[in-house]
Image (tube, grey):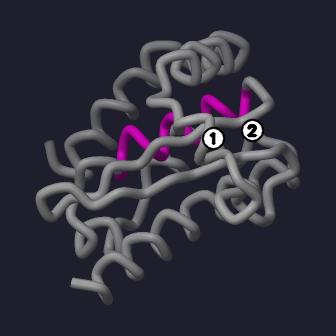
Amino acid sequence: MSIEEVENEIIEEFEFFGEDWEAKYEHLIDLGKNLPLIDAALKTEERIIQGCQSRVWLNAEQKEGRIVFTADSDAIITKGMVALMVRVLSNQTPEDIIKANMSFVDKIGLKEHLSPTRANGLVSMINQMKKEALAKLAKS
């Protein structure tokens, strides 16, 4: 699936809840429960995403020309947020990750319904995932 196809799938999921943000947050929490978790041994200081209020660990591995992300967080909403980002960007090529505009975040209204610190954390997650893609691209 392309990044755009995954984004459209997420937009449809969130549209299902209409304006019910309590239900949308519940959905986000459920997504976090299905997050491909980072190996416990990889939960190191260098894998913590800077700029997030909660602790968020991110790992990126290149497999067959695609980047596979695993992550975890110590906060349930943040874990759901990183699960969304992993769902969109994992198993994509470095080039596609770098040029992804992530417009679905605005289309589902996520940024405007987050506290300023969580919204900053979301931007930090996206930036870190793009940096990981850039680093993998530079190595190849």
Q: Secondary structure at mark 1?
A: loop
**Image point (27%, 61%), residue name:** 62
Query: Which of the pair 122/63 is nearer the observer?
Result: 63
- The three-letter code of the residue at mark 2 reads His
Query: Which of the pair 80/134 is nearer the observer?
Result: 134
Q: Secondary structure at mark 2?
A: helix
The main secondary structure of the magenta stretch is helix
Residue sitting farthest toward the front: 41
For the residue carrying disc 1, how many other residues have a C-alpha within 10 Å: few (<14), some (14-19), or many (20+)? some
Q: Measured from the top left, where is residue 82 in percent x and y?
A: 58, 41
**Image point (32%, 89%), residue name:** 138
Instruction: Confirm whether the magenta stretch covers residue 25.
Output: no
Q: Which residues are magenta?
A: 77-89
Residues under labels 1 and 2: Cα distance?
5 Å
- The three-letter code of the residue at mark 1 reads Leu
Q: Measured from the top left, where is residue 113 in percent x and y?
A: 75, 38
Q: Which mark is residue 113?
A: 2
Mark 1 highlights which residue? Answer: 110
Quadrant, the C terminus: bottom left
Instruction: Confirm whether the magenta stretch covers residue 78.
Output: yes
Indicate left or right for 107 with 122 as reference: left
**Image point (44%, 23%), residue name:** 15
Query: Which of the pair 20/115 is nearer the observer?
Result: 115
The answer to whether mark 1 and mark 2 are in CB contact below 8 A is yes
Query: Which of the pair 73/117 is nearer the observer?
Result: 73
Indicate left or right for 46 with 10 as reference: right
Q: Is residue 139 above or below residue 98?
A: below
Q: Measured from the top left, where is residue 32 in percent x and y?
A: 58, 23
